[in-house]
Amino acid sequence: MQEATFTVSLCDYPELPEDKRLQAEARYARVLAKQLGGEEQVSEALSLVQGLEDTPPEEITEDAKQMFQRWMKAARAAGEAALQGIGGTESCFFDVRRA
């Protein structure tokens, strides 16, 4: 079995039972990978998005802007799918990190 290239953690939702949290994290990871074309693409996109944090706006390429837009769309879809049926709180969020 292939080792995951990224991890997902549901944060700031302490009242959610552990099994529901694990299911939500798995759904988020699955949808994010599907939206971006696979686990390796999630890892690549995450690296790019994190790199943009310290990049001056005038140095951001069109390709990087397009990837950022794809990331945001995928993250929204993943978040909606992950919290479907369990709701959420205004402060909860998913933290995605490279493994």
Image (cartoon, rainbow, N blue to C red):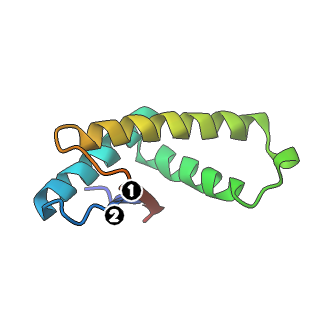
**Label of residue 12 in the image:** 2
Residue 8 lies in quadrant:
bottom left
Per the image, the residue denoted by label 1 is 91
Element type at marker 2?
loop
Q: Is residue 40 left or right of residue 13?
A: right
Q: Is residue 73 above or below residue 94?
A: above
Residue 47 lies in quadrant:
bottom right
Which residue is at the far right? Answer: 58
- Asked if marks 2 and 1 touch (Cβ < 8 Å), the reply is yes
Q: Is residue 55 left or right of residue 28?
A: right
Q: Quote the CA–CA distance across marks 2 and 1.
A: 6 Å
Residue 98 at x, y percent in the picture:
47, 62
Residue 80 at x, y percent in the picture:
33, 37
Front residue of 92 and 73: 92
Amino acid type, residue under disc 2 in the picture: Asp
Which residue is at the far front? Answer: 90
